[in-house]
């Protein structure tokens, strides 16, 4: 068996095109364009790359982006003051606080200061609570992208068995909740789980988000399963994931590559969330 490759780049492009069309329609109807405020603390090289990519994507679909670069030693009070100003600015629809933050800043307090209706990353306690309650809100971008990719090959998830390997607050846990909300029976696996492979072999869908290079081989996978690899590592001068792609592709029904799988979907879901926040504000 040779797995179908789930092309995250192509699917993300479709999402971006839909967002661009909707933004264009709103502007033609006399509304201002959506606006995303991006806050970057310090000069973490990876964060710089992510922020630049997000700003370029916003520009490409007609979303205005406002960048706020703060020094690495910024005081918590100053950051919270900026967030509150953006919360109260009617011209700003979404606020993105780029993570990770420097160690001296309380991530929970700073993220929690963002108003839920402007939390386009979907990581405030209120939006995470809405996710758990299966109540409408802005949900985390990477998990949303994962579900979008899975649905590109499995239209109805009801009754499917899904295994999520990894329980991070940003990816693993919300992905499991989204899958449950879609009607899946979900198995949550983590570093303390015993013999993870015995559980993943039961699953129709396997999402791997552990940060451990090439952890999952074909002996973990049921023939025909959908495999989503969230990991990304630079190994031997090449990018690869948590899954041994070549061998798992021999047995899986569909699989995401690294790079070009989950990664492009995160930014696509971010701008989609920004559009949603904007449209919700227009209604209010």
Image (spheres, helix red, strand yellow):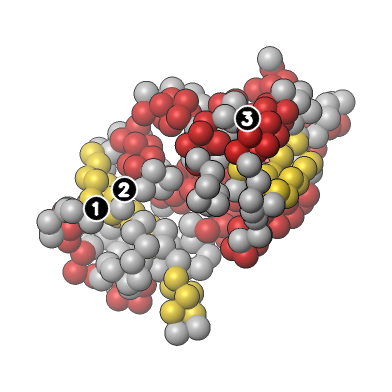
User: Residue 167, which numbered label?
Assistant: 2
Which residue is found at the position 37% from the left and 62% from the top? Answer: 211
Pick out the residue farthest to the bottom.
Answer: 236
Q: Could you give the CA–CA distance between mark 1 and mark 2, rounded to whole angstroms? A: 6 Å
Residue density around tag 2, few if under 14, some if 14–19, many if 20 or more, within 10 Å? some
Which residue is found at the position 35% from the left and 71% from the top? Answer: 213
Which residue is found at the position 59% from the left and 30% from the top? Answer: 114
Q: Earlier in the sequence, mark 1 or mark 3?
A: 3
Do tag 3 and tag 2 residues touch (Cβ < 8 Å)? no
Look at the numbered disc 2 and give the secondary structure of its residue.
loop
Q: 64 and 102: which one is in front?
A: 102
Residue density around tag 3, few if under 14, some if 14–19, many if 20 or more, within 10 Å? many
Find residue 49 and report its horizontal and vertical position in percent: 65, 62
Compared across the picture, whether 215 is left or right of 199 comes to right
Q: 115 and 268: which one is in front?
A: 115
Quarter occupied by the C terminus: top right
Look at the numbered disc 3 and give the secondary structure of its residue.
helix
User: Residue 190, which numbered label?
Assistant: 1
Look at the numbered disc 1 and give the secondary structure of its residue.
loop
Q: Is residue 211 above or below residue 125?
A: below
Residue named by callout 3: 118
Residue density around tag 1, few if under 14, some if 14–19, many if 20 or more, within 10 Å? some
Q: 230 and 100: which one is in front?
A: 100
Q: Could you give the CA–CA distance between mark 3 and mark 2, rounded to whole angstroms? A: 25 Å
Q: Could you give the CA–CA distance between mark 1 and mark 3, rounded to whole angstroms? A: 31 Å
């Amino acid at each position: 068996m040779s797995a179908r490759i789930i092309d995250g780049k192509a699917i993300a492009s479709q999402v971006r095109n839909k967002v661009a069309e909707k933004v264009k329609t709103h502007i033609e109807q006399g509304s201002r364009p959506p606006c995303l405020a991006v806050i970057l603390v310090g000069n973490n090289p990876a964060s710089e790359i992510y922020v630049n990519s997000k700003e370029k994507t916003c520009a490409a679909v007609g979303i205005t982006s406002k960048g706020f670069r703060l020094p690495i030693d910024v005081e918590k009070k100053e950051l919270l003051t900026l967030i509150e100003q953006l919360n109260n600015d009617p011209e700003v629809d979404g606020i993105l606080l780029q993570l990770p933050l420097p160690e001296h800043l309380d991530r929970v307090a700073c993220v929690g200061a963002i108003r839920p209706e402007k939390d386009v990353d979907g990581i405030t306690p209120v939006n995470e609570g809405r996710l758990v309650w299966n109540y409408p809100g802005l949900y985390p971008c990477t998990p949303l992208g994962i579900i979008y990719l899975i649905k590109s090959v499995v239209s109805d998830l009801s009754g499917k068995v899904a295994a999520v390997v990894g329980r991070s607050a940003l990816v693993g846990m919300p992905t499991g909740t989204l899958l449950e909300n879609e009607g899946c029976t979900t198995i949550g696996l983590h570093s303390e789980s015993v013999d993870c492979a015995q559980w993943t072999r039961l699953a129709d869908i396997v999402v791997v988000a552990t940060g451990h290079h090439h952890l999952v081989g074909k002996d973990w996978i049921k023939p025909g399963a959908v495999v989503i690899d969230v990991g990304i590592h630079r190994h031997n001068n090449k990018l690869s994931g948590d899954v041994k792609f070549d061998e798992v592709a021999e047995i899986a029904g569909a699989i995401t590559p690294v790079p070009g799988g989950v990664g492009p979907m995160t930014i696509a879901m971010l701008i989609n969330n920004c559009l949603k926040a904007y449209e919700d504000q227009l209604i209010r």
